[in-house]
Amino acid sequence: MIPPVKAFQVLGMLVMCLALDSAQTADQRAHSWNAKWITSPDLPGKTPAVVHFRKVLDLPAVPSHFIVHVSADNAFLLHVNQQRVGNGPSRGDLAHWRYETYDLTPFLHVGSNVIAATVWNFAEHAAAAQISDRLGFVLRAGDGADTKVSTDENWEVETEHGIAVIPTPFNVLPNSYYAAEPRERMDASKFDWAWGALEKGPISHWTKVSPVGDATLRGSELVLNNWQLIADQLPPMERKLLPSGKIVRSRGVAHADQFPETALAVPASDHASILFDNGELTTAYPELIVSRGRGASVRLTYAEALKDARGEKGNRNEIEGKEISGISDEFLLDGAEERTFSPLVWRTWRYVQIDITTHDQPLEIRQFRSWFTAFPFEERAKFSSDDPELSIIWSIGWRTARLDAHDTYMDTPYWEQLQYIGDTRIQALISYTVAGDDRLARQAIAAFDHSRIPDGITLSRYPTGLFQAIPTFSLMWVGMLQDFALYHDDAGIVREHLPGTRAVLDWFLSHQKPNGLLDKLPWWAFIDWTDGFPFGVPPQTASGDSAPITLQFVQALLDAAQLESAYGEPSRADLYKKAAAHASQAVQSLCWDDRVGLIADTPDGQHFSQEANILAVWLDVIPREQQKQALIKTLAATDATFKSDTSPPPMSKASYYFRFYLARALDHVGLADRYLELLQPWRGMVALGLTTWAEVPEPSRSDSHAWSAHPNYDLLTLVAGIRPSGFGFKKVTIEPHLGSLKRVSAVFPHARGEIGVNFAANGKSVRANVELPAGLTGTLVWKGREFSIHEGKQELMLTQ
């Protein structure tokens, strides 16, 4: 028997426990979705598959709002009453699995409504950027929606036997790394064309779904599956209908010169081929509408460029003597009228070839068109000058930046579709300056923070289902955060990610040797694609001691010191400054070669690179009085317009990518007026007919690589000279470098409005017209002189 006092204490404890349980239940309700993840009972846990889910919902009236939240693994295409609603989700990881939100009201009607989704999981054949658990789908009723629409055991599912994944062969193009989406084959005779209709089709095979656990938001106390859901903060990707391009070659097809006004006709028992030139590279969903042709096969092959018999691309506009090779999709026809064929995933191409083999029935191609897709950036900045080729370079750069940005940034839309830090830092800067848009950059900064491994560093690319660590890219992620802080007044985001930068730099500090240089790092110490850097890794001694690698460490330390001083811990800033000084002194004392006046890649002085000397100049490792001559000598090794008093030693050449850092060094030593001389490689790509910038000089695997698009950033920030004066872009510095140009005009987006500049040179004077938005002030710098500028319009006369 419990004594009265004890009984009172026990009762109190029970009341407390019940209250706690009630609070926990309320908290769980806040995180619970009241919807289940569902899958097909006929599928093993992890297998490539395409399935359809459906729910028939009877509505006595259409509500003013019918909000639903939707997600899937790998991806979904949502229809309501056979109308396309949207697709998703944006890629993330299992701990940050995104869901999309839609208002279904415009698609609903009184009576029976079919909410249906195609969901696919490519499993081991998925793109390397895809993280996955298993095929799954979830839809939850939100505001105004009937709760019966939420996914549960009452939904139906069928496996789509008409779509199959074709494994991508390693030799899709010789000696090329392909990590993007696999090929697809669609068999019209097996496809359920009525999957989104109220009435089930003749080959439908609907069964009850198999639930795989309650859907829960990230942070939920009780998680019963691996998907921790978060709301997608990105807007829907742009989707715009475009024509097919121009037929530039055809065989075995009638009416090619009249398409698309007249359908393309292919006789029975024949072979035909049609080559389309889009005129420029695109990222889009191809859509082919075909009639008849029972038993025929149609293959679409996509390529950035054609190749000749030697495997060379040459001028991208030329097709004579060239053939197509690349990723392809296949469609098998059932002979019906007006069949529409399109892959589940978007493709990349300038050239697309349609190859057709018919059997006992002719076919007609009624339409070939595409639905362009990319992140919905708007080109808010403008740049023009008296050099018309700079406008071409600007346009090609912006197209490159657009095609390499979807629900993540990506290095190349054709080959990999992976968000690498080295590429993304440059892409984010273009987004800030040309689009005035930081939404995708915020996703990227957070994604890299989420990718950090227990050691402390980030992965080189993220999201990804395939581990890859490039420690030097972790250093650039620190720089990405510093860039963000310069262009955006958002201390919360910076402080949110400072712990991540500390973990990265703590790892590197543990690898700093007593002599100040870094020891030999694990994983892939990539710096640049260049001769003399095997697989992108600069020369090192047996214990490390690489100047280029250590200099990137210095850069990150200095960036982080500024961030900590402004937003974090001053003691951290002091630690970083001391470590940077120690490393800088080590590079200068151990790697400087007095004979040639340059930094060697290692203390043994056996190899030199532009990369090491670019960084050493930019970061003040080379003494100030020697920096200009060192940079000129570095450039004289490869750029004919730069002359040095003494011959430079043989050097590894900075790639298109690393010339971004070259531009920073040029500005640092007061040579930014010679920046335009560095654009010869881009002028060469224009002459070769590229419509986006290549990854590397010829022969280039990729014809669209975002890291080569930095001239857009440089034209705005170096030539027009518009840049933040400090963190938060609360003031502006305008320091133009016109070089040989006589006229430069630019518009630059700012949080307060547009910054406009116009410079017109006439003899020894330059007329400068500047317009700043309300509330913004700053400084115009010209030939070392400073002039205060204010909001509104102003005109200044500058002396050459």
Image (cartoon, rainbow, N blue to C red):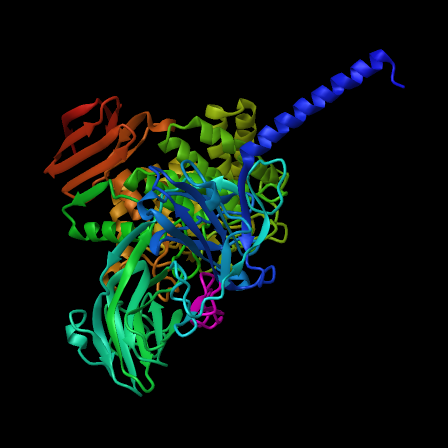
Q: Is residue 510 left or right of residue 363?
A: right
Residue farthest to the top, as pictured: 5
- Residue at 18% of width from left, 69% of height from top? 260
Magenta-colored span = 159-184
Q: Residue at x 51, y 49 (%)?
A: 460
Would residue 339 be visible to someone looking at this image?
A: yes
The percent position of residue 609, horizontal first and vertical second, equals: 45, 52
- 168 shown above or below 533: below
Asked whether 161 falls inside the magenta stretch, the response is yes
* Position of residue 691 in the picture relative to residue 227 (left or right): left
Residue in front for this viewpoint, 210 or 776:
210
**Is 531 situated above or below 219?**
below
Name the quarter where the C terminus is drawn.
top left
Q: Is residue 55 above or below residue 720?
A: below
Main SS, magenta region, reads: loop
Residue 646 shows in this picture = no
Position of residue 274 measured from the top left corner of the image (x, y, whole percent):
26, 76
In which quadrant will I find the N terminus? Answer: top right
* Position of residue 719 measured from the top left corner of the image (x, y, whole percent): 24, 41
Quarter of image, res 731: top left
Above or below, 134 against 496 in this view is below
